[in-house]
Amino acid sequence: MLKIKNKSMKYTIPFTTRWADFDPNLHMRHSAYNDYAAEVRLRYFKAKGITINVLAKEHIGPVLFEEHTSFRKEIHLGENITGTIQLVGLSKNGERWKLRHNLYNEAGDLAAEIQVYGAWIDTEKRKLTTPPDSFQLLFTDLEKTSDFEEIVLKKKK
């Protein structure tokens, strides 16, 4: 596992970058950063028992409203990288959440920060939903950022 310079994270995933992740200038494609963040997120869900089969059985899935990427350092072709996940915000009922993914280059420097704002959707009704109790462990066990805030939902009229 790569050593992260800034601070130790509870949940990290190492990756070896692929040829397909890079553009003709041998820079990692901007969308590849987001692909790695999504992979970290879904591997974290799986590690907590929320697999694709569970999602299908419960008729629920994650949906993103926003995705913001801040690029800090270049990632080079063939470099090993590490991705992390932290909780930035959560609504009381667990319906909405904000996550921060950091991607670190092989030297352990922060290469990109990807913040996502999402929720759970009922895949049959195609409407936002409160997740089952079994999903609550996803976020209660996840490391919170120093700027963590409760997401306050607006009351429906």
Image: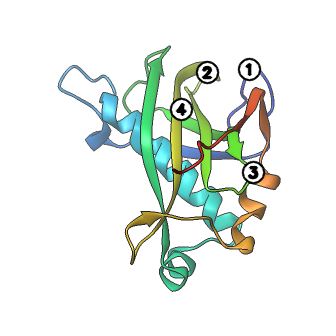
CB atoms at circles 2 and 4 under 8 Å apart? Answer: no
Residue 113: x, y in percent? 54, 25
Question: Camera-side residue: 139 or 75?
Answer: 139
Q: Which residue is mark 2?
A: 107
Q: Amino acid at mark 1?
A: Lys
| Precedes in sequence: disc 3 or disc 4 | 3
Element type at marker 3?
loop
User: x, y percentage for residue 24?
Assistant: 17, 25
Name the image quarter holding residue 100: top right
Q: Nearer the viewer, mark 3 or mark 1?
A: 3
Near mark 2 (Cα within 10 A), the count class, few <14, some 14-19 or many ≥20, is some
Q: Secondary structure at mark 1?
A: loop
On the image, the x and y values in percent for residue 135 come to: 69, 67
User: How many angstroms separate mark 1 from mark 4 (CA)?
Assistant: 20 Å
- Residue 124: tell me if it is visible: yes
- In contact (CB < 8 Å): disc 2 and disc 1: yes
Q: Which residue is mark 4?
A: 115
Label 1, on which residue? 5
